[in-house]
Amino acid sequence: MTAVLKSELLAERLRLRKKIQSGGAPQGIVTSLAIQKGEHYVLSRYEDDVWILPDDWFSANVVVSQRKLDFARIQSPALRSEAKLVMFRQMWGVTDASSSLRGSTLGLHFNNLCYWIEWLTGLRTVTHADVTPLLAQRYVDHVRSLKSRIGEKKSLAPATQQQRLAAVEMCWKNLRDTPLGFDHPWPDSSATALAGLKTHRKPSTPIIPEEILAALFQYAESQLERAGELLDHRDALNRLALKSMNRTDQAKEKGQFLAMRGWSDGLQAYHKALLTLRDSCFLLILTTTGIRAHELANIKRDNWFSEVREGERFYFLGSRSDKTYAGETQWICPEIAITAVQVLGRLAEPLQEELDQALEQATAIGNYREAGRLNGISSHVSLCKINQRSAIINVLSGNALILRLQMLTDYLSLDWKLAPHQFRRTFANHVVHHKLGDLRYLRDHFKHWSLDMAALYAFNEAQDLELFDEIYRAFDEKRQSIIGHWLEPDTVISGGMAPYVREMRSRNETVRTYKNRKEMIHAISELIYLRSTGIAWCTNDIGVDCAGGQCEECEHGCIDDTHKPFWRGLYLQQIELRQIDDCGVAGSETVERTIRRCEQVLRDLGVNIEELKERIADVEAV
């Protein structure tokens, strides 16, 4: 193992850059790991065929095997040398300081570079200097001909095609000022255009259906409620002095001990229950915070706090965000998310003890890379072992999280392909529905979002600002959808605002003012404040002159066909109240007045009142 001072490292990297630019045979340190007292442990040199990448370039949930660039994959020595040049420049921003890559993104670019070079090798092309636009176009045709899986007829997804073609552009950018440079592969186009991708696309991530999320959340919550019992069993098992020497007899002892404590399902079922508890905690946190999978993996025990504002307690969960290099970030969350983090912390205690011992051993023998890795994941609540027989401790990988969440979904017989990234968009959708008064399930867990979002962010500016932006986008989409529905010529509406909406529909010149109807809806929705009163949409943005629930008469209230079930239910309820004899004069007058209100709104919404009355009469006769 080689250790160098930071000053030596920087000087050698500078020499390496100059050597690359001059066209000589490069040699020098490519990657290193900071250890102590300004020293760095050398991970890789330029001349190595495998470049080990620093652990702190990756999210904690990326497996160790993916933290390297293996140039031995490239058969041609010349093209292998050129690939190193491209990746070094891309890693350290030699060509463009703003485009330096790190972590899994770097690995993705390298994989796509290997696909490109493998294709060149098959054509017996020995250097990038021989690449022409015609040759590059042949690669475009090749990528378009590839299938997503062997034996399938489906082509690669456009995003995957774009990544394959972007590797060619990456080579052009990083080699153009060297003797290996070549003309732009497609002078009048780009990888994005050739892959058929639009520059502005609607989010492709699906929102988890409410019935699916409700079933998952209810099950996860039920598991959280039994956490104390399961963990008490675990702690008692760890204190148990085993009499047997072999594993089989030890397992029997543990099973009998659990049975004495009231767990009669056996040791294997108990271990499975602990895993299910862990996965349930992950699901609860993802659902109620909107954090990403790698941010979930970066959560450490006790990295949360709460404070009381105006009589209301607010909870904040902390973690590290790597996607936008935001670093330490916080998320406002309900108490159940904090409870889940606390349970995860207690679940990870035995593994944390093992990690501390392994860290001490690695430090003692000078294994700085392993010590650095273990120190980087210490105190994380998602600690796990790669498999039951492995002694290697890591945090749960992204792929493993996907698998575990899908296992929960399958166990509940839910027809949905669940993935961690779906929770963020689903979370934003739930916040919007809550702010519009239209969130039924999980309403209590989102009550803190009733406040203005600017005020919520002002509480703590260390929060995930990008998540707030995503919520704003979701709110704009929902608002445009609602207002666009109002402006449809066949949408039935009622309320004091209805005449103004109908007048806007009839203005032909309004449409001509904008490029198209979509642009018109976007422009109009930007000017309209919108919230739900439960019985109507309210556009009153000043908080005064409220009609006090008389939305059908208020100039700010618009009632569309989505409110029809409520008004129908209210009407049927009032018909029942009419049959009560002891309501008094005032009560009877209120009932009659409410019946007239309901009938007017329902008529506006296209309901045949006389036919409805006949059906009610038939039911009462029965």
Image (tube, rainbow, N blue to C red):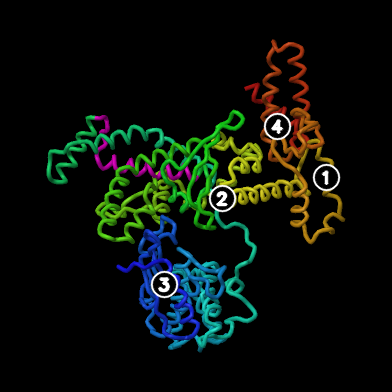
Which secondary structure lies at badge 1? helix
Q: Nearer the viewer, mark 2 or mark 4?
A: 2
Which secondary structure lies at badge 4? helix
585 lies left or right of 364: right
Q: Which mark is residue 567?
A: 4
Q: CA distance from mark 3 to mark 2?
A: 38 Å
Q: Nearer the viewer, mark 1 or mark 3?
A: 3
Q: x, y percentage for residue 97?
A: 55, 70
Does label 3 or label 4 sit earlier along the sequence? 3
Say which amino acid is labelled 1.
Arg
Q: Quadrant of residue 38?
A: bottom left
Residues shaded magenta: 261-286
What residue appears at the point 78 percent right and 55 percent down from the top-left corner?
520
Taking depth in this image into account, of 367 and 5 the one nearest to the observer is: 5
Say which amino acid is labelled 2.
Arg
What residue appears at the point 66 percent right and 43 percent down from the top-left corner?
454
Q: Which mark is residue 502?
A: 1
